[in-house]
Amino acid sequence: MLIGVLGCMAERLKSKLLEEEKLVDIVVGPDAYRSLPQLIDEAETGTKAVNVLLSREETYADISPVRLNSNGINAFVSIMRGCNNMCAFCVVPFTRGRERSRDEASIVAECRDLFEQGYKEVTLLGQNVDSYYWVDPNTNHPVDFAMLLEKVSQISPSLRIRFSTSHPKDITDKVLHTMKAHANICKYIHLPVQSGSTRILQLMNRTYTREWYLAKVKRIKEIMPDCAISADIITGFCTETEQDHEDTLDIMRQSQYEYSYMFAYSERPGTLAAKRYSDDVPDDVKKRRLDEIVKLQNNLSLETNKKDIGKVFEVLIEGNSKKSNLQWMGRNSQNKVMVFDKIENTQLQPGSFVHVLAESCTQGTLMGKIVNHS
Ligand code: SF4
């Protein structure tokens, strides 16, 4: 048996794993997966096999992953790797290297192939999808993210498209109008805010202000009033005051997030924040602020769900609901989970689209009934 460690942390842990504790045979960084067969051959001879070099070109184009444990309905396609931003709390620029975008044609071909295999939804993935940029070497024509989205959406009207993650500084009106123009591009944007305080945003090196972020939220809602927005929020970042925390609560209220991923700040070795600032907000203060943020988000999620009662949504069925085999569970375009009773004598199955009337809700789920199916 050979034991290997693969991924972003491999570079940082390599000497500990290989030399100090002699725990593993293979250590492979995120840009060296193509050399796995040679590294395994090497390790089989008894030599420790290591490749943690970061690449400026590797995008894993044309490697189609075998999707183990997939439900056969939702697939994820990487369109780029790495990140050129330098958010002070983030380790990605050091572990995944510079940003590079994948060949547009290979992305579209992979998505088409997934659709032909029966997948109904693809999520285009990247650390910062809105800065996707590819120049076709044959025509010299540049392709930006809006153009890529449009191409993927044209594969079939019955293939749903999602994407993540958007950096607020990079998502453009062109992307928003492309989303609006194509019904199969889901009306949902994950738009990490991280903090509602301009002072903290500057320390985090997020390159936007509170006002700039709020203007972006307003623009999204102007172009697509039905678009759901979620966020990432870090509480207790270095030097965060009560006023900064209040600003975060306020930006959450103003943005009316459908959902948030919320964390207390935890220092990552090697980041700009670890080098420059002291992690000086006490743990009990971080915990209390996180509790307040989570409580507010729970209320916002409930309120936004209540506003959906009485509306009909197209839902992609993903499987049985957690609680009952007599009910289906699926998501609407806004990425909200909907649960509804199955109906007899229909061909409906996971992967089918149905129209569901929302009749009641909790903070995490809309409950309803099927009103139309094909
Ligand atoms: S938080 Fe996102 S945008 Fe910022 S450096 Fe990390 S990956 Fe890049």
Image: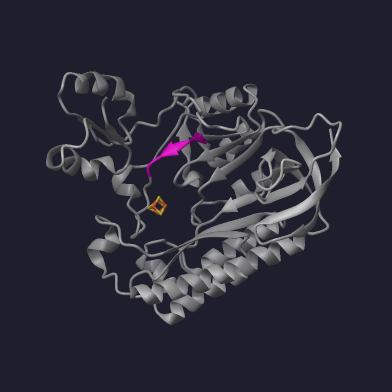
For image coordinates 27% across by 24% down, the residue present is 1
Q: Quadrant of the C terminus?
A: top right
Residue 273, position in %: x, y?
Answer: 29, 63
Residue 304, position in %: x, y?
Answer: 69, 63
Image position of 145 (left or right of 266): right
Report whether residue 184 is seen. no
* 346 or 263: nearer the viewer: 346
Give the quadrant of residue 234. bottom left
Residue 178, position in %: x, y?
Answer: 65, 43
Q: Is residue 307 above or below residue 311?
A: below
* 282 or 113: nearer the viewer: 282
Q: Is residue 49 above or below residue 189?
A: above
Image position of 222 (left or right of 20): right
Q: Main secondary structure of the magenta part?
A: strand
For image coordinates 70% across by 67% down, the residue present is 303
Does the magenta segment cover residue 78? yes
Q: Which residues are magenta?
A: 77-82
Image position of 74 (left or right of 246): right
Does the magenta segment cover residue 285? no
